[in-house]
């Protein structure tokens, strides 16, 4: 990012941070109590009891690095309100507790802001514009920093996704900068913070194998098998082993690895997480022809496909997992019109599917206004960026998205006034989930076809 871009980037970062502060008094979900309980567990108990403690139903079920993160936060939390660190104080809330937990999310988002800045540096500058508002780097910064889904999930609903996505985006940026070992290290650390990112591990593994372990290509761009580097594979293996040893080593020594694994992968839970995630279940969908990935663009395509495929076909999928596909797709959306169209489609549907997370009346105008602002900006900025090309959405896609408006009116205004609300309270959630599932499935298929046809086109040109 050029020196002149630091001013507007800082303004965007400070602006969204101020908005996050304004959201502090908003509704928060049971995840607020989840993290308060984890603060108490890691602060009071020895490590040998972290993954056994079950006073609360919200037991510790994140990897060890996140547990240590909670432990570190707890040593600051004690200066705000020591009572929040009492394990038996279930559902404890005080003004000091709310302020501490809200500000802890805002503060750790600094890593996300830095990662966005690094990603902006990786954007291809071919579409240079005189007006800063039309620069791809500016548009990307807004799409990431002001992402509607991340705002409501972290700063209203309450979670710590910001700094975790920061680790992922920073690893992506390092790989785009050909700093492969740094990218691998960051992703390995991320996996031991939150294991949901294992969904995109195939994209990392294949890209590192293709771009780092094989050092050269043939003249036609195909893989040169003799260039395979044992040293590079060894270095990657050492990174994975050392990070895993640092994270899981203490529990292996204590003979508790099985207990940790059972908490991280609770297969006793049902197939579906409620019915909010707009997906359908099947076996995990592997990415075909993975070794044909060339360059950072191919890596990002593979990463988004892995994330979206896991969302579509995963076990006990959370509705918030759609962000795992939306955020990296932002990087592609400012580089090619076809990707921008898929981004607009998936982002609008995915963000709308998060509406049921905020079900209290005071949050209704907030979520509608924030999504409206983000959606209008996304459409206007990307259409302006690709104004010389064909429309980003076809008429059928446009009609589908417009129908979200009457669906929201029915779910939020009309249905509560009908007698059905007493007997069928699940109907709004069901309608939202099913309707969004159709759109997400379409976006997934469109992205998959786009990637495969692009690969065929590249191969034909090479031949």
Image (spheres, helix red, strand yellow):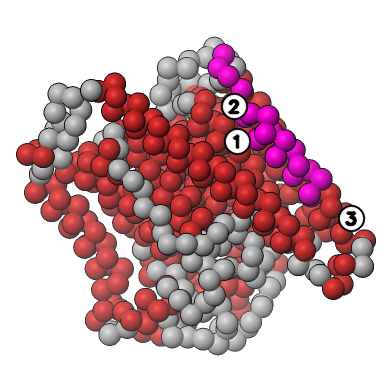
For label 2, the residue is 392
Q: Earlier in the sequence, mark 1 or mark 2?
A: 1
Quadrant of res 299: top left
Reply above or below: 252 against 162: below
Determine the main secondary structure of the stretch shown in magenta.
helix
Q: Earlier in the sequence, mark 3 or mark 1?
A: 1
- The residue at the point 15 percent across, 24 percent down is 219
Reply above or below: 200 against 179: below
- The residue at the point 14 percent across, 47 percent down is 232
For label 1, the residue is 344
- Using the rendered image of the protein, determine whether residue 100 is visible from the camera's viewpoint: no
For label 3, the residue is 414
Q: Nearer the viewer, residue 215 or 455?
A: 455
* Disc 3 element: helix
Label 3 crowding class (10 Å Cα cut-off): few <14, some 14-19, many 20+?
few
Quadrant of res 191: bottom left
* Disc 2 element: loop
Specify start and end residues of the magenta stretch as a single range.
388-408
Q: Position of residue 337 (x, y in %)?
A: 52, 25
Reply above or below: 221 against 210: above
Residue 393 lies within the magenta run: yes
**Label 1–label 2 contact, CB within 8 A:** yes
- The residue at the point 62 percent across, 29 percent down is 393
Q: Position of residue 98 (x, y in %)?
A: 66, 65
Q: Number of numbered discs present?
A: 3
Q: Residue furthest left?
A: 226
Q: Nearer the viewer, residue 277 or 96?
A: 277
Location of the N terminus by quadrant is: top left
């Amino acid at each position: 990012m050029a020196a002149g871009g630091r001013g507007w980037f800082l303004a965007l970062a400070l602006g969204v941070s101020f908005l996050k502060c304004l959201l502090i008094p908003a509704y928060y979900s049971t995840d607020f109590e989840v993290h308060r309980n984890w603060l108490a567990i890691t602060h009071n108990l020895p490590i040998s009891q972290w993954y056994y403690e079950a006073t609360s139903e919200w037991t510790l079920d994140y990897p060890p690095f996140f547990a240590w993160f909670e432990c570190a936060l707890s040593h600051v939390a004690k200066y705000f309100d020591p009572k929040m660190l009492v394990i038996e104080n279930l559902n404890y809330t005080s003004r000091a507790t709310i302020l501490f937990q809200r500000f802890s999310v805002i503060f750790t988002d600094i890593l996300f802001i830095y990662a966005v800045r690094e990603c902006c540096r990786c954007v291809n500058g071919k579409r240079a514009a005189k007006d800063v508002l039309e620069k791809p780097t500016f548009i990307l910064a807004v799409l990431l920093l002001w992402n509607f889904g991340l705002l409501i999930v972290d700063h209203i609903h309450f979670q710590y996704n910001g700094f975790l996505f920061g680790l992922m985006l920073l690893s992506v940026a390092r790989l785009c900068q050909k700093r492969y070992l740094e990218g691998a290290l960051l992703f390995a650390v991320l996996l031991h913070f939150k294991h949901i990112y294992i969904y995109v591990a195939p994209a990392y593994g294949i890209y590192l194998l293709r771009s780092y372990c094989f050092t050269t290509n043939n003249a036609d761009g195909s893989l040169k098998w003799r260039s395979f580097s044992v040293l590079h594979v060894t270095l990657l293996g050492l990174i994975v082993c050392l990070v895993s040893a640092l994270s899981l080593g203490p529990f292996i020594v204590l003979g508790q690895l099985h207990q940790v694994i059972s908490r991280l992968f609770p297969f006793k839970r049902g197939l579906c997480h409620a019915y909010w995630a707009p997906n359908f279940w099947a076996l995990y969908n592997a990415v075909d022809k993975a070794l044909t990935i060339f360059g950072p663009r191919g890596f990002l395509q593979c990463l988004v496909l892995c994330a979206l495929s896991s969302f579509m076909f995963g076990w006990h999928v959370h509705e918030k997992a759609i962000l795992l596909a939306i955020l990296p797709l932002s990087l592609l959306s400012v580089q090619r019109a076809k990707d921008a169209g898929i981004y607009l489609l998936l982002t609008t549907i995915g963000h709308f599917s998060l509406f049921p997370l905020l079900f209290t009346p005071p949050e209704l105008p907030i979520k509608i206004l924030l999504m409206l602002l983000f959606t209008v900006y996304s459409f206007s900025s990307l259409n302006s960026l690709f104004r010389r090309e064909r429309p980003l959405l076809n008429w059928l896609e446009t009609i589908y998205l417009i129908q979200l408006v009457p669906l929201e009116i029915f779910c939020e205004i009309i249905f509560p006034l009908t007698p059905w609300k007493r007997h069928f309270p699940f109907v709004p959630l069901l309608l939202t989930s099913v309707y969004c599932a159709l759109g997400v499935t379409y976006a997934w298929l469109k992205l998959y076809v786009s990637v495969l046809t692009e690969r065929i086109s590249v191969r034909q040109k090479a031949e």
